[in-house]
């Protein structure tokens, strides 16, 4: 019994570590997009520098989970939880890479007074961040029903991305702002990929709770 109590405490600690990583990644996404919106060099640099901390946190979570697998001989449900923790940490680390990519766009284009971001792209960022929060909350609360609603959210992001892509491609024909719009197209793609990563996390939550595989982003 004492061993089980100790193991449960370790699992709770691992969940806390994952939640902290998720919050840090979401903050990075928000900061990166704001840096792009405002062409804020210092904010963008902080996002880029902070990526190293996120990478280390992801490695620490993986090592923690693998140590528990190796030493505790977890039962099937616990094994799913540990495997899912490793997979979600990896998804979050990739989201942080996208945030770093957006921050780099802000650095590259910061010096010039450039057009405001498209409203559809602002909406994409809002939805992608909300999806990441929902995915993380679904994992913490073991809420597979909420996780499965990420599929509809992702469809909305995909539709917005198509709008943004078409609009930015047209505007890239204007020489004075072509580089800016090309950078925005990359940033919009990163946002679309963030939404995909959120659905991946949702799939892991469904697997954790229901022990079945689903595809939320076919």
Image (tube, rainbow, N blue to C red):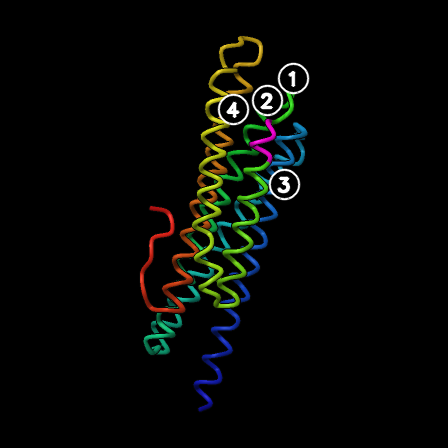
Q: Residue at x 48, y 68 (%)?
A: 142
Task: State how far apart marks 2 and 1 are (Cα).
Answer: 6 Å
On residue 183, which mark appears? 4
Are the two marked residues, 2 and 1, in contact with CB atoms closer than 8 angstroms? yes
Q: Of helix, strand and loop, which one carries label 4?
A: helix
Task: State how far apart marks 2 and 3 are (Cα).
Answer: 16 Å
Q: Residue at x 53, y 20 (%)?
A: 181
Q: Give percent across and percent down for residue 65.
A: 41, 66
Task: State how far apart marks 3 and 4 are (Cα).
Answer: 17 Å
Are the two marked residues, 4 and 2, in contact with CB atoms closer than 8 angstroms? yes
Q: Looking at the image, is 159 positioned above or below residue 84?
A: above
Q: Give percent across and percent down for residue 3.
A: 44, 86
Sequence order check, earlier mark of 4 and 1: 1
Residue 135 vs residue 86, the one in the foreground? 135
Residue on which disc 1 sits: 112
Are the two marked residues, 2 and 3, in contact with CB atoms closer than 8 angstroms? no
Sequence order check, earlier mark of 3 and 1: 3
Sequence order check, earlier mark of 3 and 4: 3
Q: Give percent across and percent down for residue 215.
A: 34, 53
Residue on which disc 2 sits: 109
Q: Residue at x 33, y 78 (%)?
A: 75
Residue on which disc 3 sits: 31
């Amino acid at each position: 019994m004492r061993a089980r109590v100790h193991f449960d405490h370790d699992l709770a600690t691992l969940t806390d570590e994952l939640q902290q990583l998720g919050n840090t990644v979401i903050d990075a996404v928000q900061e990166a997009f704001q840096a792009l919106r405002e062409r804020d060099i210092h904010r963008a640099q902080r996002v880029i520098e902070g990526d190293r901390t996120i990478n280390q946190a992801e490695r620490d979570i993986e090592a923690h989970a693998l140590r528990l697998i190796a030493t505790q001989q977890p039962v099937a449900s616990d094994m799913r939880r540990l495997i899912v923790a490793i997979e979600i940490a990896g998804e979050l680390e990739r989201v942080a890479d996208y945030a770093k990519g957006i921050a780099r766009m802000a650095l590259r284009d910061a010096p010039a007074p450039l057009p405001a971001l498209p409203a559809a792209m602002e909406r994409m960022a809002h939805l992608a961040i909300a999806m990441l929060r929902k995915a993380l909350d679904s994992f913490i609360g073991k809420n597979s029903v909420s996780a499965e609603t990420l599929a509809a959210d992702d469809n909305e992001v995909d539709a917005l991305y198509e709008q943004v892509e078409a609009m930015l491609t047209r505007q890239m024909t204007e020489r004075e702002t072509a580089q800016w719009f090309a950078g925005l197209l990359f940033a919009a793609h990163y946002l679309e990929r963030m939404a995909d990563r959120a659905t991946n996390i949702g799939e892991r939550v469904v697997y954790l709770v229901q022990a079945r595989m689903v595809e939320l982003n076919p």
